[in-house]
Amino acid sequence: METSAVLTAPVLDVTPQDLDTILDELTAFHAIFSPLFARQEQRDWAHQYLYGLLLEIPRKSIEPMVLALHGADCNAVRGMQQFLSAGAWDDRAILQRLWPEIARDVGDAEDGVLVLDGSDFPKQGTESAGVKRQYCGQLGKTANCQAGMFLAYASPRGYALLDRRLYLPEDWCTDASTDRRVACGIPATVPFTTKPMLGLEMIQAVRAAGSLPFQWVTGDAAFGDTTALLDAIAGLDTWYFMEVAHDTRVWRERPATAPAPWSGRGRKPTKARLVPEAAAPVGVADLAAELPAQAWQHATIQEGGQGPQVAAFAFQRVVAVRDGLPGPEVWLVLRRSMRDGELKTYLSNAPADITPTRLIRTSGMRWPIETCFLVGKQELGMGDYDVRSWRGWHHHMTLVILALAFLVRLQGRFKQTLRL
């Protein structure tokens, strides 16, 4: 069986332990963001926190980091806690300053991809911002946890995290939760927002900044099944490539619509509806089952640590469903694993004349965010924070994102071998 080879993104294989001159390099990297901290004390703490996240210690919460950096210094512990949990520094400004640096290191105007995904953090107790018994992806079951939404960037040159949002469950947004919101420092202006819409906020922020080139947005079915998100992404002059559930329904061809017949009284109907003889939409998995063998082509793609993956692909132009009526014409991309037969189904608003190679490559560009989470949690203390406040969570995640971007920069600078 002949297959074409399609490269996605290089694997990030630099860890803090690989670097002998990390402190000097980190000082230069930190200097890029230093002007955004209002006080010298904040600049110093930011540098120390970044360095602590890169240390080879078992746990990277504040006390172990301070112990490694300063010894048993209670004042230093309190100072770092204050900096992280209550410090009045603008973490969004820090991230926006990071994006042009990401563009410099791994940006790609044609094949740059924004990747949406969530990552959850098991927690004890009920006092941490947004904590709730809910599905926890890290544990694979319902558990007490905080749910984070993240946006990553990936291209054939590399990848990095860009942004983060802490998800607030609905019961945190009621009057009954006012006291615990105040205790966690959650601004009164923060409303309940679904995870897909938190993702859209981050995408819109990157688009508005204009400092990081991208053409695509990708994510799993939790996002692909939210049509309002897909239409909003399309409205940003961006192509989405989203996994969708197998029972997602589409039309093979655009069905006819017409206003309802006028009864002769009142206003003439103007709202379109399907004509009685219109075909019903069909499930995307059913379409895949109907395709003949010659409709499929094989490709080998690299997906992170999993190594080369051989899959069969098929592509069809279909009409999406919007509120029971025909919506935009989109690509249905079908991907079947040659190892275990697993079928994945995607919808994309990419142009009708796009090449199959680009669609295949984009189907393999979601793994970088999973690798970012893996490196973040195993190497950079992403889940080791002990802070409970809204501000503390966002500050910690911002600094983890900076630490990861630092490793990405060093990989490029020191020309580490990339496993393609």
Image (spheres, helix red, strand yellow):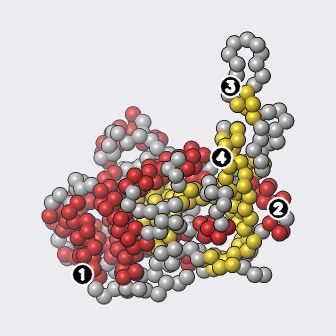
Distance from label 4 to label 3 (Cα)?
20 Å
Q: What residue is shown at x 39% (from left), y 39% (from top)?
A: 177
Q: Position of residue 121 (x, y in %)?
A: 45, 60
**Residue at the disc numbered 1:** 24
**Residue at the disc numbered 2:** 291
Residue 102's place in the image compared with 273, above or below, is: below
Question: Crowding near pointer 3: few (<14 within 10 Å), some, many (20+)?
Answer: few
Question: Crowding near pointer 4: few (<14 within 10 Å), some, many (20+)?
Answer: few
* Secondary element at tag 3: loop
Q: Is residue 155 visible?
A: yes
Which amino acid type is marked by label 2? Leu
Question: Crowding near pointer 1: few (<14 within 10 Å), some, many (20+)?
Answer: few
Distance from label 2 to label 4 (Cα)?
22 Å
- Of residues 163 and 185, the one nearer the viewer is 163
Distance from label 3 to label 1 (Cα)?
68 Å
Q: What residue is shown at x 77% (from left), y 48% (from top)?
A: 253
Quarter where residue 379 is shown: bottom left
Q: Disc 1 or disc 2, which is closer to the eye?
A: 2
Residue 43's place in the image compared with 165, above or below, is: below
Quarter where residue 239 is shown: bottom right
Q: Is residue 91 visible?
A: no
Q: Position of residue 345 (x, y in %)?
A: 69, 59
Which amino acid type is marked by label 1? Asp
**Residue at the disc numbered 3:** 270
* Secondary element at tag 4: strand
Residue 276's place in the image compared with 40, above or below, is: above
- Of residues 184 and 371, the one nearer the viewer is 371
Which mark is first along the chain, 1 or 4? 1
